[in-house]
Image (cartoon, rainbow, N blue to C red):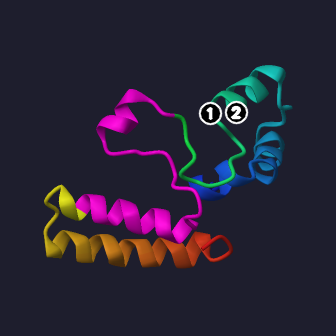
Amino acid sequence: MLTIPFELFVLDPSPYLLKIEGLLGSKITNKTKKIIKKQNIPREKVSDGIPLKIYKRCGWEKPISGYTERDELQKRREYAALQGAGSKALNILDEMSVEYEKKYLQDIL
């Protein structure tokens, strides 16, 4: 089994692509490289995604210059609160976020 944390993949896909190649017994093709580039991978910041309408409709905004990854995450948490997420839901979000960050994101936050 291979777990690929989204955040780590979009910042540096190479190690994961190599693992996938090994697991599948295949090689990365030009088509794969084209798709990765289209998805803006690798990225400077996790939040520096592609501006699809669906993302914008769900509150995505371009990253703010000078913001850290932590600042961007806080901005998104505040968005959830402004959209009406209750304190219980925000507490669950916070607990899940802490657990996920400890497991996968200690190196980037």
Find out whether the residues at labels 1 and 2 contact each other: C-beta distance under 8 Å.
Answer: yes
* The stretch drawn in magenta includes residue 70: yes
Q: Quadrant of the N terminus?
A: bottom right
Q: Is residue 1 visible?
A: no
In the picture provided, is 68 more to the left or to the right than 27?
A: left
Task: Report x, y in % for residue 64.
Answer: 51, 55
Q: Which residues are magenta?
A: 51-80
**Residue that appears at 72% across and 45% down:** 42
Q: CA distance from mark 1 to mark 2?
A: 5 Å
Name the residue beneath numbered marker 2. Answer: 36
Which part of the image, by quadrant, shows the C terminus? bottom right
Amino acid beneath label 2: Ile
Judged left or right of residue 51, residue 29 is: right
Q: Quadrant of residue 87?
A: bottom left
> According to the image, label 1 marks what residue?
39
Image coordinates of residue 75 in percent, x first then y, are 38, 63
